[in-house]
Amino acid sequence: MKALVLDGCREGDYLAMEAALEMTTALAGRVDDVEVVILRELVISACTGCFGCWTRTPGECVLKDDAGKVLRSYVGSDVVAFVTPVTFGGYSSQLKMMLDRLIPLLDPRFTIVGGEVHHRLRYGRFPKTIVLGTLPSPDAGAERLFAGLVARNGRNMHQTIEAEVLVGVPDPPSARQCVERLLDRIGVTA
Amino acid sequence: MNTLILVGSPKGRTSASWMLGSKLAEGLQDHGVTVQFAMVHQELCSGEGAGNLMDLIDSTDLVVLAFPLYVDSLPAPLTRLLELVAERRGRTASEGSPRLAVIVQCGFPEANQCDTAIGICRQFAGFVGMPWAGALAMGMGGMLEGDFKRLPGGGKKILDALRKTAEALARGGDIPDDAKALFARPLSPRWLYTAFGNLGWRKKMRKNKAQRPIGYRPYAQG
């Protein structure tokens, strides 16, 4: 089993960086292969909204940067973990930059998911996705929004995405517990 | 009164966000409001542009974010701008903070798919102390190509919603509920929109001379 960690932490955000480290360590104890992508170290351009990945070179973005390598790893993974500081209830811009570039994994044709219109999946399925957010202090509004965003992303990926938010100062045992809970919930066992 | 319309679409002045923002600007100008535009993607390409954008935000009375829904949220560069503004302003509301309003559209038929994006903008406004003036959200954004006259009914519902919004914002009010409802009303039956949408993708593929089938899987294993 292969896992991919998309580390959307900002440099110097020790809580989120701790979360990414614990996610990686916990996954390494449960799956055969863990790849960590530290998004702040890659060159990933913003999606230009050209739909070239659907209508010019179906399945591949027309922009040539590091996002292509991440997409290949994404498709070849069984589990993908997003790690991000909760940013106004959403994802960090670093993670979002990559998520905006995931649309080549979708097929433009419409289908119905949960009573709403969404796109078909190009590969028949998305890897099982989990999300670990971090907040320096409790913020019920941001946590509620974050849960709503993750649920909406799940509809786009035709799955239920499990998420946790780690709140407080960096604390490895708490972070590890949080990650272990997430992995238990998606049935990834050692 | 001054208004800054931040276009969050990478397509800039050829985008649906620009089209909607421009029409709102006309309404605001009719009420004596001075309107300035900025293209977020283009400005963020340089550190200087980001600083200029933040200066513009600090010196206006109303900021309108006009953007397309990207993965249930804001396009990444717009998210980056919000992060930069928050870093600069901190958590404390400063005197004379501009108000924040939003116009968002998505390519799915359901306007409520924009709700999380609106929530994020509102959360940001609360964080940086910008009074919230409300949001307009619409689905079927794929129909917004170039001209309102090409829309069913000449786009009257959208134009009415933008006119009511401009009136309210110009007098310092919030976006009225009837404008939100008009703006969110579907432009066509859902089945028709998706049928034409599916045909439209194939038409664009032919126009682009795509060499692969629509469901091609370049990263498939083996």
Image: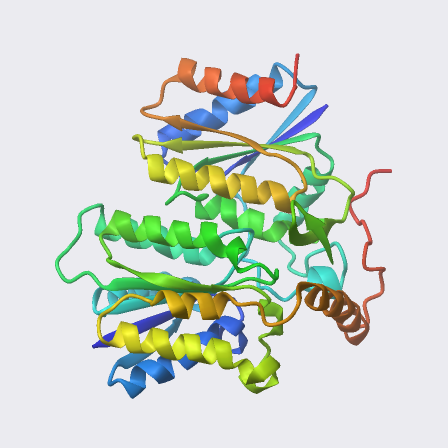
Residue sitting at x 37%, y 45%: A88
Horizontal and vertical percent position of residue A79: 66, 29
Measuring 26% from the left and 68% from the top, which residue is drawn there?
B62
Res B66 visible: no
Is there any visible trace of residue A112 in the rendered image?
A: yes
Quadrant in the rendering for residue B61: bottom left
Which color scheme is applied?
A: rainbow
**Does residue A73 sit above or below B15 in this rendering?**
above
- Left or right: B190, with B205 as reference point: left
Quadrant in the picture for residue A13: top left
Looking at the rendered image, the quarter that the C terminus of chain B falls into is top right
Where does the image place residue B214, in percent across and percent down from the top left? 81, 59
- In the picture, measured across the screen, residue A123 lies left or right of residue A96, that is right
Instruction: Write the residue at 47% across / 15% down.
Output: A177
From the top left corner, tell me how far across and down residue A159 is, in percent: 66, 37
Of the pair A148 and B210, the residue shown nearer to us: A148
* Nearer the observer, B179 or A180: B179
Against B20, residue B212 (above or below) is above
Q: Where is residue A174? Give x, y as percent.
A: 41, 16
Residue most extreme to the front: B178
Front residue (pair B171, A106): B171
Image point (24%, 57%), residue name: B130
Instruction: Identify whether A131 is placed above or below B55.
Output: above
